[in-house]
Image (cartoon, helix red, strand yellow):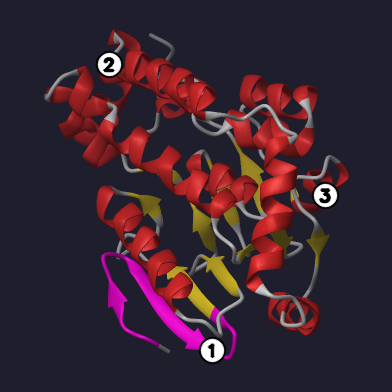
């Protein structure tokens, strides 16, 4: 087990760099520090000529819950440009997942919400345990999952992503596999990764990169898509509804659905 830095623990294994989100509060949210640490993990994996896989996972029954609301509340107080900073960093990280010549594998064991769903959807392969569930609760906060939806729609198609965003209801790992957010539901994710490695280590990283580039060229997610997503995220997180609900949460620790409708 490797050291933990900025809420991410890195463990080097043969042909794999394992990046484990392990924040002290157990939410495994995507703070600026966590995003920086995940970017640094990708740098390290790419610099290792023997590495084939960047493995993303959570800890304590939570994969990732997305936006760090404490940080978002502070950013929102600094104005729209400051509020959009985290969104820009998140979009850049997901784009790197698509461009790296490594295979990015998300192992989800437990809860994935908001940006955590995006983190999984941006990976090349998603493995989940039976107890895992996926949700997009952004609308409850007065937001839209702007940064998540481009990569999610690429995986699932329009309607499953739309239903998740509108209903805000969690879906099980089996249901997520039905609409292709999850590639495999397994009792033992480590065993599934080992099986993948048997195949992936036979591929040259350049071939993995070419394969990913070809598929990326066939899809609609572009830098223009990212720019649109960031504009909308920045606008919405600075809206009165979102600012009020996020501030209420950071002040009272009560979630929006735990109090009467305003």
Q: Is residue 54 visible?
A: yes
Task: Give the extent of the magenta segment.
Answer: 2-16
The image quarter in which residue 110 lies: bottom right
* Sequence-wise first label, 2 or 3: 3
Q: Is residue 157 left or right of residue 108?
A: right
Query: Disc 2 and disc 1: Cα gap in Å?
Result: 42 Å
State the image quarter where residue 154 is shown: top right
Identify the secondary structure beneath mark 1.
strand
Q: Magenta segment: does it hold 250?
A: no
Give the residue at mark 1: 13
Residue 116 numbered mark, or none:
none
Query: In the figure, is residue 157 to the left or right of 113?
Result: right
Mark 2 surroundings: few (<14), some (14-19) or many (≥20) residues within 10 A: many
- Above or below, 199 against 125 in this view is below
Q: Nearer the viewer, mark 3 or mark 1?
A: 1
Instruction: Name which residue lies at 43% across and 29% down.
Output: 258
For mark 2, what is the residue? 238
Q: Which mark is residue 177?
A: 3
Instruction: Give the camera-side residue of 8 and 15.
Output: 15
Image quarter where the N terminus lies is: bottom left
Residue in the foreground of this view, choosing between 41 and 8: 41
């Amino acid at each position: 087990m490797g050291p933990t830095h900025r809420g991410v623990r890195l463990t080097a294994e043969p042909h794999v760099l394992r990046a484990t989100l392990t924040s002290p509060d157990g939410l495994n949210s995507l703070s600026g520090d966590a995003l920086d640490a995940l970017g640094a993990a990708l740098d390290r994996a790419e610099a290792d000529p023997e590495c084939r896989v960047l493995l993303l996972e959570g800890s304590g029954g939570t994969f990732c819950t997305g936006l760090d609301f404490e940080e978002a509340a502070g950013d929102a107080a600094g104005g729209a440009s400051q509020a959009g900073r985290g969104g820009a960093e998140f979009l850049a990280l997901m784009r790197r997942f698509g461009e790296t010549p490594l295979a990015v594998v998300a192992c989800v064991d437990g809860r994935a919400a908001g940006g955590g769903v995006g983190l999984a959807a941006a990976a090349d392969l998603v493995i989940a345990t039976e107890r895992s569930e996926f949700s997009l609760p952004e609308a409850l906060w007065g937001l839209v999952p702007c940064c998540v939806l481009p990569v999610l729609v690429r995986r699932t198609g329009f309607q499953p992503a739309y239903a998740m965003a509108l209903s805000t209801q969690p879906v099980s790992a089996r249901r997520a596999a039905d609409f292709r957010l999850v590639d495999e539901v397994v009792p033992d994710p480590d065993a599934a990764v080992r099986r993948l490695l048997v195949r992936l280590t036979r591929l040259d990283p350049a071939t993995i990169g070419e394969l990913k580039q070809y598929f990326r060229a066939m899809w609609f997610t572009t830098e223009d898509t990212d720019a649109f997503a960031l504009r909308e995220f920045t606008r919405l997180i600075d809206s009165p509804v979102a600012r009020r609900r996020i501030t209420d949460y950071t002040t009272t620790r009560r979630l929006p659905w735990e109090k009467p409708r305003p």
